[in-house]
Image (spheres, rainbow, N blue to C red):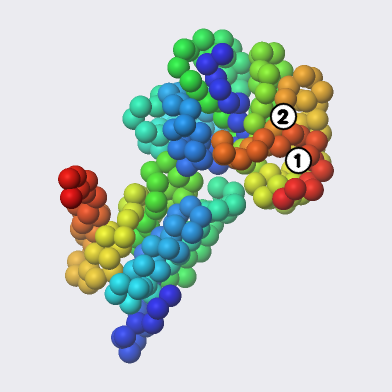
Amino acid sequence: MSESNDAETEKPKAIVVGHGEFSAGLVSAVGQICGLADKLVVLSNTGMAPGDIEAAIRFQLVRTGARVIFTDLPGGSGTIAARRIAKENPDLVLVTGVNLATLLDFVFNSAGTPEEAARAAAERGKASLIVIERG
Amino acid sequence: MAILLYRIDDRLIHGQVVVGWGQPHDIRFLVLVDDLVASSDWEKELYRMAIPPEMEIHFADVETAIREHARYASDPRPGILITGDVTSMLRLVRGVKAIGSVNLGGIHHRAGREEKLRYVFLTPDEAEQLRALEASGVEVTAQDVPSARARPLAEVLDGVSK
């Protein structure tokens, strides 16, 4: 992860869970574009049993105090695990289908609650998915 | 038979099932055979929300799945049946007596299991159940995604190819 320019290192605000190197790639891209990769925690579900994915997410939530989880695929095992955790923690926010535009919006949003930031980021992510035809 | 794959996968429904197998085979229905999930409305809703709108899902405990198997198998659409563990699949195969092959899709590490493949870990008892399954005439192979090679059970149990 790249270094923050802030004198005080801020705790991560969200956990990004995905298949393979998806999360690492996205967070690396956030770092390359704006240097704020340290606001995100990378978690891959590769090779993990369902209970282990859940435990890894829980561990990172406790360690960082993050209240937002981004996952890659609605039907993925990371999303299933996150939904189990969210069931017991109503203040957690889960956003699935994350893309780079979503994360860039989220890391820059310093106003409002985590839920508001996640909602705004999801809208930005949806709007960034565009079919460009005939150049 | 409309059920293209009988899969043992402890993650039940996830990316490899819904997308990895689902898209190339145009899978239109899933049968999730799990006693715990079948008894919980919340669990059923959790997995129902994990599948794309073009897929249908049936939930059943093992006994119900044995009774309803002929109905699932007569569905003209392509489908996948999933159990979360070896024992449930063995019970199903013995109860139905019409299942010709079983796919090991994901049985992950836990205490007492030994690594056979990067996605298949087995206790000695589970290995024995799989041997019994094959001895009864059922082909057992390990294959996490369609593009991977289907590894015969003997090769899996040898644990030589990780």
User: Helix, strand, or loop for circle 2?
Assistant: strand
Above or below for A50 versus A68: above
Location of residue B83 (image quadrant): top right
**Displayed quadrant of residue A6:** bottom left
Few, some or many C-alpha atoms within 10 Å of disc 2 (few <14, some 14-19, many ≥20)?
A: many
Q: CA distance from mark 1 to mark 2?
A: 10 Å
Q: Is label 1 in a helix, a strand or a loop?
A: helix
Residue type at the position of mark 2: Val
Q: Which residue is mark 1?
A: B156
* Quadrant that contains the N terminus of chain B: top right
Q: Is residue A49 above or below residue B102?
A: below
* Residue at the image point whose x is 29% and y is 74% from the top: A34
Is residue B85 among the parts visible in the rendering? no
Q: Is residue B52 above or below residue A40?
A: above
Residue B77 falls left or right of residue A36: right
Q: Residue B124's x, y, as percent?
A: 81, 41
Tag 1, which chain?
A: B
Q: Taking A15 as reference, is B98 above or below it?
A: above
Q: Position of residue A101 (x, y in %)?
A: 27, 60
Q: Earlier in the sequence, mark 1 or mark 2?
A: 2
**Callout 1 touching callout 2 (CB < 8 Å):** yes
- Which residue is at the front of the view, A91 or B74? B74
State the count of labels. 2
Q: Which residue is mark 2?
A: B140
